Amino acid sequence: MDQSSSSKVPLLTGEDISRIEIEVGVLEAQTRFCIVMLNCPDKPTERAVARLLLATQNGQKALAHDDLTYFGDQRIQVVFLPGPGPDRLLVEVFASPCEGHLTVPFLFRDHVTRESTEVFDTVFEVSGHYHLILGRRGRAKTNQISLIKYTITDQTGRQQGSHQW
């Protein structure tokens, strides 16, 4: 990964971004909560993505504790789209462009199983929120960043229909 001259927003190459997978499901901790996880291949990429998300999100940090937990972010979007087949969906995580801009600052895109989204949907219906977090090699890293999100756009035409929660 190339090092950026900016300490706030790192330079992620196309190769870096293409190696980031998206996982959707439920994390079993003290309680169950649903997650959308950007799964990074290594620690430098994970740090770079964390800084990118922090620079992009527009929510408020939770209270005054050390965890990087933010509520109320409206900038970063998660969208479910029809996938290549009946058992797979396409999921996109991106930042809406700033007012007056036409380009999207970043876009992560991956296929997820329909089964994992059904488990996610069940917990999301009950809780009313989910966490956008990072992971490394399949392991959730909630200490890097946790954006608590309340809306997700579903354009798949599943049983719930196309709507925004």
Image (cartoon, rainbow, N blue to C red):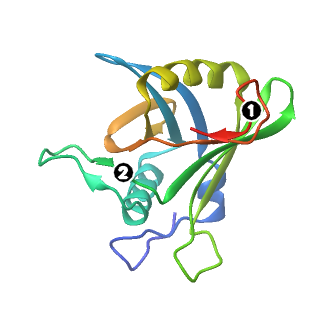
At x 28%, y 16%, the residue is 30
At x 61%, y 56%, the residue is 17
Q: Residues within 10 Å of mark 1 (few under 14, many from 20)?
A: few
Viewport quadrant of the C terminus:
top right
Which residue is label 1 attached to?
161
Horizontal side, residue 90 vs residue 70: left or right: right
Q: Position of residue 80 (x, y in %)?
A: 68, 40
Name the one closer to the observer, 18 or 131: 131
Q: Position of residue 131 (x, y in %)?
A: 42, 37
Circle 2 SS class: loop
Q: Residues within 10 Å of mark 2 (few under 14, many from 20)?
A: some
- In the rendered structure, which amino acid carries the disc numbered 1? Gly
Q: Position of residue 15 (x, y in %)?
A: 65, 58
Q: In the image, which is nearer the foreground, mark 2 or mark 1? A: 1
Name the one closer to the observer, 26 or 73: 73
Cα distance, mark 2 to mark 1? 25 Å
Q: Which mark is residue 72?
A: 2
At x 50%, y 70%, the residue is 11
Circle 1 SS class: loop
In the rendered structure, which disc, 2 or 1, sits on the residue that comes first in sequence?
2
Residue 10, placed above or below residue 77: below
- In the rendered structure, which amino acid carries the disc numbered 2? Gly
Which image quadrant for residue 13?
bottom right
Count of residue discs: 2
At x 32%, y 16%, the residue is 31
Name the one closer to the observer, 122 or 116: 122
Disc 2 to disc 1: CB gap under 8 Å: no
Residue at the farthest left position: 64
Residue 98, placed above or below residue 117: below
Horizontal side, residue 75 vs residue 144: left or right: right
